[in-house]
Image (cartoon, coloured by chain):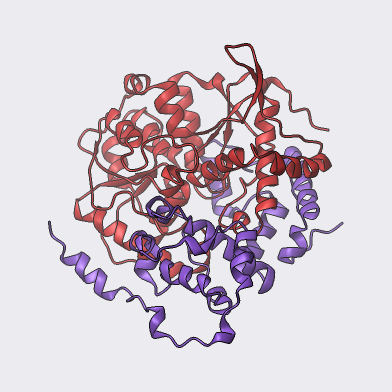
Amino acid sequence: MIDTKDARTAAKYGLFYGCIIPNRYPGIERSVKVIFEKLGCNQLFSEMPQATCCPVPGIFYSSDKDTWLVLAARNLCIAQDRKQELVTFCNGCFSSLLMATEQLSDPKKLGMVNRILKNVFMKYTGVPRVTPEGRRILEPIKVRHFVDVLYRDIGLETIKSAVVNPLNGLRVAVHYGCHYLRPTENECIEDPVNPIMVDDIVASLGAKSVNYENKLDCCGAGGGVRSHVVGLAAAISRDKLMNISNVGADLIVTPCPYCLLQLDTVQERLELPRVPVFHVAQLIALALGADPQCLGLEAHAVRADEIISKYGGTK
Amino acid sequence: MDISHARKEFIISEKERLLEEIPIVDEECNRDFIRAIIEMGGGDVQVCLQCGNCTGVCPVSLKTENKVRNIIKMCQMGLKERVLSTPWVCATCHRCYEHCPAGMNPAELIIALRHIVVRELGPPPFVVSISNNVANLGQAIEISDKILDLRKKIGLNEKPFDERYRSKAIMDIKTIMKATGYDKLIGIDLGD
């Protein structure tokens, strides 16, 4: 039996990296660690080594909702036992786990989930809290997006004051991605038709977020499209990338590694000007003076050498 | 605003093939299909007004001949065989849901249709392979040697996860999949 109540319990947030970051773009994982070190808030965050795939909604939510919900609840239980908020770095993990917390408020579904979780010695209850009126209630596990935690909990001022490589003159096209914004049936982290948090983070690093046509359009990869019909995903990405190169952006920045994977690798198939794609964590790490090697850009299909030689100066 | 490229894109996109242009025989209509969709959580397709807002904002409808409005209309008429043979191509971006005046959630309808496909025609191959990955690795994708090297080089643990925790996690996943019957549904062997 593995003891989950170890020293890590003290941290407020549990880090849920998901599948794509550790296995495809490990530079994002490293960048996140660098950011917390530079901002001096390392002690607030702890790893979640027991966590597994969120599970991926394009597969599990599409083929068996019950299995999807139990596997998601298992991940939520890890945060619950440590009384932590769960921080995701991927729109897919974010929407899958957030949707799970909302569905688990249905007693019928909760009963089904807990009957099965009993087999693995877990139980989803939520986190106990006492209301101002003195009532004891159980709140769902808080599922947070990294961008939301940076913006609302850590604050732009803190990030701004830690910038050592201001990204002056860098023209950034921000791609939010669908599951950052929708479905609005879930609790929204910001205005789904006029999101600003990633743009503001980009601006706080000294770069300029450029507007482009159909900015909130889909990258084309989600829901199993990329896995099933690669060409269709590429056709959808192509529109996006065309709009981005029309405004002459130097870099695409997204809060989602799956959108990153799509917009990055698809460029090998398209005859369009190449634009490198970063996760928002990689851009912040660069501006905070991380060693450019930490960004793990070797894993990216589109090289970002120009940006690194221009902005990756201070070590 | 320069819309020349947009116009070009529109022309190369697939035209909507209206259902009215396709001959339909009575035997094709399966009224139980509408109830089956509700049971799978897809909602009541009969509330759809056929306004086409969903199709107008759908990234997939723009690029293929699978238009959301048509899929819903086929569901309303109970054209089960035709609906189930449309490919698994919804990005679940949920724009359709945001724009639906009738309060339907077409993305959830597509999810329900996928549930029916998996149960009646069997899952597409990528569902089997990714489910297998999750059951055996705890992760949806496998890591390559190149990324293992890169992880070490940039100062991370070479393996993305601590093996001690991982074997317990994989055991949990297999137990859960067996309890929900997911292994049998998808056709994967989880061992004893």
Q: Is residue A5 left or right of residue A76?
A: right
Using the rendered view, name the quadrant where residue B115 is placed.
Answer: bottom right
Q: Residue at x 57, y 80 (%)?
A: B29
Q: Is residue A214 above or below residue B18?
A: above
Q: Residue at x 68, y 40 (%)?
A: A73
Q: Is residue A279 above or below residue A246?
A: above
Q: Position of residue A257 (x, y in %)?
A: 46, 47
Please state which of residues A46 and B49 is positioned toward the viewer in this rendering: B49
Using the rendered view, name the quadrant where residue A161 is placed.
Answer: top left
Q: In the displayed image of the protein, which residue is found farthest to the right?
A: B192
* Colour seen for chain B: purple
Q: Is residue A101 left or right of residue A302?
A: right
Q: Is residue B143 left or right of residue A184?
A: right
Please state which of residues A87 and A158 is positioned toward the viewer in this rendering: A87
Q: Residue at x 33, y 49 (%)?
A: A216
Q: Residue at x 62, y 65 (%)?
A: B35
Q: Position of residue A157 (x, y in %)?
A: 33, 19
Which chain appears red?
Answer: A
Q: Position of residue B91 (x, y in %)?
A: 46, 59
Please state which of residues B31 and A185 is positioned toward the viewer in this rendering: B31
Q: Position of residue A186 (x, y in %)?
A: 50, 41
